[in-house]
Image (tube, rainbow, N blue to C red):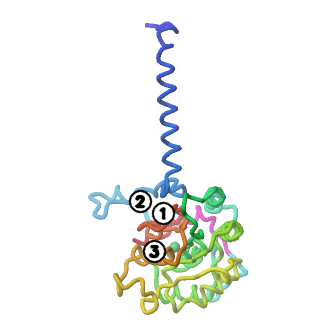
Amino acid sequence: MTRSPSSLRPRRPVRTAVLAALAAALLIILALPGSAIGLIRDAVAPPPAVPTSADQIQNIDQVKTAIKGYYGDMIDPSRVNPIDGTAIHTFSPNSSYANEMAGIVGGAENYLTRPRARSGDFRPKAVVFDVDDTTLNTFSYEIYSNFVYNPTSNAAFVNSGVFHAVPHMVDLEHYAEAHGYSVFFLTGRPETQRAGTVANLTSEGYDVQNSKLYLKDYALDTWLSSCKPACSTIQYKSLTRAHIESLGYDIAADFGDQYSDLTGGFADQTFKLPNPMYYLP
Ligand SMILES: [Mg+2]
C-alpha cells in the first residue's frame, strides 16, 4: 500500500524535533565539565579474564603485527639501543598513530583556547601531562622487550633518554604555555629516574625549565601518606593532582595514555591518548 504524501506530512515536525533534541543533548553532554573530549571511544573490548573458549581471545602474534602496523614500525639509525647497541625501532611520522595523535592534539588545542573564566574562579590554570606514551613514546622499548616489561631493561632505556616525543605533544605543551597555562608533568617513573627523564623531555623539545615534574617518591611526596607505601596508580596520580590544586591551580586538562592517569578527579577535562601496547590499572 502506498501512502499519500499528505499522510506523511504531520510526522516530519515530530521527527525534526526529535533530531534537534538529540543534537542539543549531545552538545550539552560535550559541554559538561568533566566530559572527556579525548575519550572519543573506548579501547577494543578486552577478552574475559577466564575465557571459556579460545575464540574469545585474539591471537597474540596477530595483535603484535597489528600494533607494529598501527605505529608504522621502522628503524631509526640515528638512535642507539642502550643495551645492545643496535639501532632502535620507532614509529613512522606517517603512521595511523601519528595521524590519530594529530586529531587529538587539534581537539585539545581547541579546548585550551576556549574561554576558561568561570564566575568567581580566578585560579591560575594548569595542564597535566603523563610521560610514558603521553609525552615520550616507548615503542622502541616495547619492540626490544617484545612487549614484556622488565624494570632493569626499561630503566636502561629511560636513563639513556632515547625515546622520541609523542607526535604533536611538544607543540601542545608550547601551545598551552603560550595560552597562559602552567605545565605539570606527572609520571609513575621513580625519582631515581629524574635525570634521564628531564634530559629526554628536554632533548625532544619540551620546556621542562618552566614546568614542574613529579616523579614518584614516597619519602618526598607527603600528600601520599594516606596510601603509601603501596599507592595504586590512580591514588598516586589523583592525590598528586589534588596536591597541585591545593597549591592554588585549577587543572583544566589532564593528558594520559592510561585510564588510571585520568580517573580520580581533580581535572576539568581528560584526554585519553592511544596506547595499544600495555595496560596499567
Ligand atoms: Mg603513560
Task: Residue 82: tell me if it is visible.
Answer: yes
Residue 58: mark in rendering: 2
Q: Is 279 situated above or below 105?
A: below
Q: Residue at x 63, y 75 (%)?
A: 89
Q: Are marks 1 and 2 in contact (CB under 8 Å)?
A: yes
Distance of label 3 from label 1 (alpha carbons):
37 Å
Q: Nearer the viewer, residue 46 or 110?
A: 110
Q: Is residue 102 left or right of residue 42?
A: right
Residue 225: mark in rendering: none
Q: Is 27 situated above or below 161?
A: above
Give the number of the mark in front: 3 or 2. Answer: 3
Q: Is ligand 1 closer than 8 angstroms to the Cβ of mark 3?
A: no
Q: Amino acid at mark 1?
A: Val
Position in image of residue 58 (x %, y %): 41, 59
Residue 242: mark in rendering: 3
First to last magenta residue range: 61-75
Q: Nearer the viewer, residue 63 or 122?
A: 122
Task: Residue 143: tell me if it is visible.
Answer: no
**Which quadrant of the structure image shows residue 75?**
bottom right
Position in image of residue 266 (x %, y %): 46, 68
Of the numbered discs 3 and 2, the one sitting upstream in the chain is 2
Q: Amino acid at mark 3?
A: Ala
Q: Identify the secondary structure beneath mark 1.
A: helix
Q: Is ligand 1 closer than 8 angstroms to the Cβ of mark 1?
A: no
Position in image of residue 20 (x %, y %): 52, 32
The C terminus appears in which quarter of the rendering? bottom left
Distance of label 3 from label 2 (alpha carbons):
39 Å
Q: Residue at x 54, y 68 (%)?
A: 251
CA neighbours of label 1 inside 10 A, class few (<14), some (14 to 19), many (20+): few
CA neighbours of label 2 inside 10 A, class few (<14), some (14 to 19), many (20+): few
Residue 63: mark in rendering: 1
Distance of label 1 from label 2 (alpha carbons):
7 Å
